[in-house]
Amino acid sequence: MTTVTPRGFLFALDDGDVQRVTDAGALDLHAVLEPLWGQADRVIEADRAWRDIHRALALNDPEGVLSRALLVGQAPGGSSSRIVLAREVEATSRALARIDYDDFRDRFISCLPGDPDEEGDAVKAAYAYRWFTCLQAFYRAAASARRAVLFTVDLSVEPPRAVRVA
């Protein structure tokens, strides 16, 4: 049986949103986040590349600032969602901004299992990097707006197509 990685999403949350997410927990997360769909500055998709991006970011520092970008942080209601509080978003944004394609590719390839496949690994790294650059831009915008960032894979309803990153 093949396990499919769920798509990941990031939301930029103001203080009121953070409080509603914290109060709702995992049980009603979708209802709290639904009003943000379609607001390009408030939500992006990380596709299924989020898992590879997280591994590459957490490679040498699993509890560090780069790890926080996706899966380390406060978990509302014990879900697989994480919030990076607004006061931490700027530091996370700066750390993400320091990673260029070569650094990302090296991190990505070094955490792949099995024997290296130069051509295939380069294609996978380029695909993940495309999504990573969206993550960088999203964190930069959230930092400028002084918003927290929530990452989740818990959404049971597909977002409108307009949310997808080009």
Image (cartoon, grey):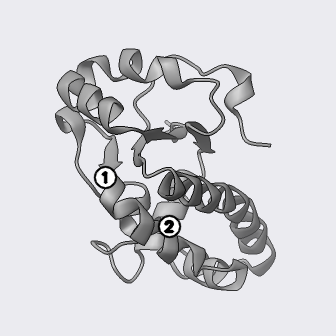
Q: Earlier in the sequence, mark 1 or mark 2?
A: 1
Quarter holding residue 98:
bottom right
Judged left or right of residue 101, residue 65 is left
Relative to 17, does residue 63 appear above or below in the rendering? Answer: below
Q: SS class of the residue under badge 1?
A: loop
The tag on residue 85 is 1
Question: Where does the image place residue 107, in percent across and percent down from the top left?
Answer: 55, 80
Quarter holding residue 124:
bottom right
Depth order, front residue of 166/53: 166
Task: Identify the residue shown where x is 32% and y is 46%.
Answer: 82
Depth order, front residue of 39/56: 39
Question: Where does the image place residue 70, in percent across and percent down from the top left?
Answer: 42, 55
**Residues packed near mark 1 inside 10 Å, few (<14), some (14 to 19) or many (20 plus):** many
Question: Where does the image place residue 10, in percent across and percent down from the top left?
Answer: 50, 42
Question: Where does the image place residue 89, in percent across and percent down from the top left?
Answer: 40, 60
Task: Find the distance from the CA under tag 1 to the CA under tag 2.
Answer: 12 Å
Tell me if residue 113 can be seen: no
Q: SS class of the residue under badge 2?
A: helix
Relative to 31, does residue 16 appear above or below in the rendering? Answer: below
**Residues packed near mark 2 inside 10 Å, few (<14), some (14 to 19) or many (20 plus):** many
Relative to 93, does residue 146 appear above or below in the rendering? Answer: above
**Image quarter hosting the C terminus:** top right
The residue at which mark 2 appears reads as 93
